[in-house]
Amino acid sequence: MARAPAFLALMCLVVSSLAGGAEAKNNVSVYMLKRGNFSVKMTNWGATIMSIVVPNSKGHLADVVLGKDTLNEYFNDGCYFGPLTGRVGQRIARGRFVLDGKVYHTYVNDGRNTIHGGRRGFSKVVWTVKEYVAGGSSPYITLFYRSFDGEEGFPGDLDVYATYQLTGPYALSIRTNATAVNRATPVNLLQHLYLNLGGEGSGDVLGHKLRLAASRYTPLDDELLPSSGRVAPVAGTSYDFRSPTPIGARVRRVSGGRGLVGYDTNYVIDGEGMRKFAAVWDDASGRGVELWANQPAMQLYTGNGLNDTVRGKGGKVYGRYGGFCLETQGYPDAVNHPEFPSQTLRPGQVYKHDMLYKFYF
Ligand SMILES: *[C@@H]1O[C@H](CO)[C@@H](O)[C@H](O)[C@H]1NC(C)=O
Ligand SMILES: *[C@@H]1O[C@H](CO)[C@@H](O)[C@H](O)[C@H]1NC(C)=O
Ligand SMILES: *[C@@H]1O[C@H](CO)[C@@H](O)[C@H](O)[C@H]1NC(C)=O
Ligand SMILES: *[C@@H]1O[C@H](CO)[C@@H](O)[C@H](O)[C@H]1NC(C)=O
């Protein structure tokens, strides 16, 4: 395997301009959800969150989501700014797994591994808008995607719904479900939202104080795979965020894989069911967010692959650590690790992944 592509893949991926198909792109639009001065902008391209505008304690509104200005830029985005990635959002080692005695090969796009569902996954495709209510007390949009048998190498047809709804003051709920139509398949949806509570493009997030409900994590190797299958305590390591700690306090001591520095870490979240995963507070802007979810784990990514050549809204520079991602999920490469909680979905079963972002100030 050549080293160069591995390094490229680690940053933002190079995107084929044909992804999604030129025809289908005619059906892509922008959808606003608005409740008072809290608003969320979505597109049915990749079920992508384009912006979240929220006040702070000083009475200022800001867009806290890293992203792009135009749909055209989202078509070509390789940094995964805001989409729902799948069918398996996390890595699959060597793009290979065995299910019910059959070997499957998924599209390899991260060195020699698969990430974010492959070449286009669920993030470079058009989702169907099933319902859309822009205003009122709980505006929402429901998106649907039918993934076909063999898409990116995955087995069987899969029906996926995702509902984005403003369920309370400054609360964004994301409820997803998936059903395997005819064959068993791994499923692990992952919303790849980059946040900066000071406002997108306002600098780095190293001063944000992070608290995680995680006393364990899965050590990852240099390809960011959990190859040892180990689950280790965070106590006494740079991964311990059980009490509020600035993201930057120990970020330079942490390997982000393949030469990058920073968190790209899978945490095992304590407890089960819908529960608080994380709280982040930024003193400088007077803005915070809590994230609740019902999954076993969460990837903390601190934007290690961003750099001064990555441009966002209004041409702003999104440098290294310019945003953080809290990706609620199943364990990485679970399909190749029977010792991890299973992410295999069989016909007749329903995968449900709920997330709730609660902003405060
Ligand atoms: C900056 O990021 C871009 C996009 O990920 C990547 O192509 C480029 O190689 C990076 N540059 C440096 C100097 O790391
Ligand atoms: C656009 O969406 C409509 C309704 O979902 C569908 O019938 C039509 O085929 C789509 N057109 C393209 C070009 O994808
Ligand atoms: C946002 O709306 C709330 C509730 O109406 C109000 O109290 C607050 O002052 C507003 N903040 C800004 C920055 O507009
Ligand atoms: C999945 O979500 C859609 C949209 O909310 C809903 O209509 C459907 O009943 C859900 N499916 C299951 C199996 O829960």
Image: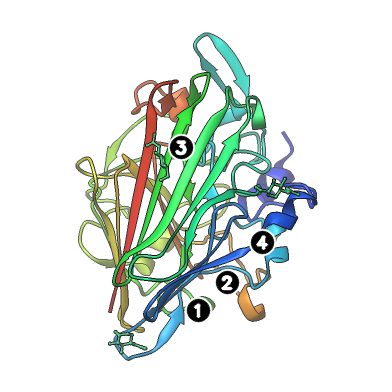
Label 3 environment density (alpha carbons within 10 Å; few <14, some 14–19, many ≥20): many
Real-space Cα distance between discs 3 and 4?
A: 22 Å
- Quadrant that contains the N terminus: top right
> Dot 1 corresponds to which residue?
203
> Dot 2 corresponds to which residue?
319
> Dot 4 corresponds to which residue?
74
- Indicate whether 231 appears above or below 238: above
Please say which color scheme the image uses: rainbow
Callout 1: SS: loop
| Image position, residue 253 (x, y; %) | 41, 58
Q: Are marks 1 and 2 in contact (CB under 8 Å)?
A: yes
Callout 3: SS: loop
- Identify which residue, 265 or 14, lies in the foreground: 14
| Image position, residue 57 (x, y; %) | 29, 86
Which residue lies at the image location 59% right of the left edge and 52% below the top edge?
Answer: 46
- Indicate whether 337 appears above or below 128: above
| Comes first in the chain, label 1 or label 2 | 1
Q: Are marks 1 and 4 in contact (CB under 8 Å)?
A: no
Which residue lies at the image location 50% right of the left edge and 57% below the top edge?
Answer: 261
Residue 228 image label: none
- Identify which residue, 251 or 61, lies in the foreground: 61
Residue flagged by tag 4: what amino acid is it?
Tyr
Looking at the rendered image, the disc whose residue lies closer to the viewer, 4 or 2, is: 4
Which residue lies at the image location 49% right of the left edge and 59% below the top edge?
Answer: 132
| Comes first in the chain, label 3 or label 4 | 4
